[in-house]
Amino acid sequence: MLEGKSVIVTGAGSGIGRSTALVLAGYGARLLLADIDHGTCRETADLVVAQGGTATAVKADVSVEDDVESMVEAAVAVYGRLDGAFNNAGVDGAFESVAESTSENWHRVMSVNLEGVWLCLRAELRRMLGSGGSIVNTSSTGGLVGMGIGLSAYVAAKHGVVGLTRAAALEYATQGIRVNAVCPGTVRTGMYEQVVATGVVTEEQIAAMQPINRAAQPEEIAEAVAWLLSDRASFVTGQAWAVDGGLVAQ
Ligand code: NAI
């Protein structure tokens, strides 16, 4: 489905990013994997290579402009072109009411989850102009609904990702570049473990948020991303696709 395509994956060292890297490689994509944690990112690259795929790992903080520019240049240097990108790196937010929320948490979440996606998207679009491509940004069901559990900075950032996705999709629709977002429900990753560890919500409560009554495995998000990145989704742009066990259908 993605044979020979050169694709960037950010946040590739863990969770959804790592699973998506393995799924994309299985469909034939050649990967430029990026993460702020170079050790785990290299582990993902090793896993891809061990399953017969092609991957190069780079260290990049998506909230740092120079890192993002170097990441995109690396993809082009290694593979000669850039066909796709999955802008997925993100951090969870502190659980705090709006009235009690802190500037520190707000800026940390915004700088990675929204500004990081913007920096990546901008650099990737510049590279894809003239040749076309497909970009998928990771939002969340928290990018579509308010959640009401004290994650306002996270929710605001993820709504921002949806807005950015739609704006970019419209601007580049006639230039062969599609831009979409995935909005996962709860997914069993490191971020999931961190939220459970806070004790704010139990695993049973998390499962019950989804009508399917369980959290997702990261591979279930990866399959949606792979399809959006592929030419099979050639008429799909500007979408915020909830892959959420029915959560936002309620
Ligand atoms: P994770 O914590 O397992 O993986 C996140 C990865 O991003 C880590 O490898 C981390 O090192 C990397 N990262 C963090 N900050 C970075 C930065 N500044 N630059 C580069 N890399 C950075 O988390 P998970 O669950 O795989 O999350 C991936 C994305 O999915 C995030 O955007 C998250 O908000 C989103 N998401 C996760 C959900 C969940 O339930 N796990 C639900 C909805 C959305």
Image (tube, rainbow, N blue to C red):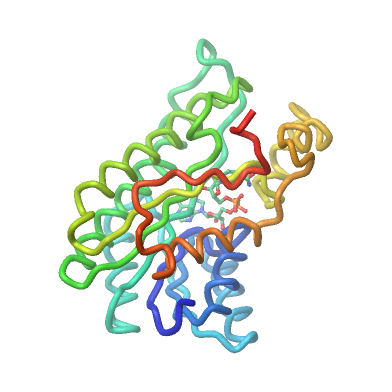
Q: Is residue 68 above or below residue 247?
A: below
What residue is at 49 percent from the left and 46 percent from the top? 241
| Quarter of the view holding residue 120 | bottom left
Coordinates of residue 14 in the picture (x, y in percent): 61, 60
Question: Is residue 175 rendered to the left or right of residue 42?
Answer: left
- Quadrant of the snapshot with the C terminus: top right
What residue is at 56 percent from the left and 26 percent from the top? 151
| Quarter of the view holding residue 149 | top right
Q: Is residue 10 above or below residue 162?
A: below
Which is more toward the observer, 205 or 224?
A: 224
Q: Residue furthest front?
A: 235
Coordinates of residue 161 in the picture (x, y in percent): 39, 41
Question: Is residue 99 rendered to the left or right of residue 159?
Answer: right
Q: Residue furthest bottom?
A: 52
Coordinates of residue 221 in the picture (x, y in percent): 60, 56
What residue is at 75 percent from the left and 41 percent from the top? 212
| Quarter of the view holding residue 229 | bottom left
What residue is at 40 percent from the left and 72 percent from the top? 7
Question: Is residue 124 rendered to the left or right of residue 236?
Answer: left
Which is more toward the observer, 57 or 187?
A: 187
Which is more toward the observer, 13 or 164?
A: 164
Coordinates of residue 43 in the picture (x, y in percent): 61, 74
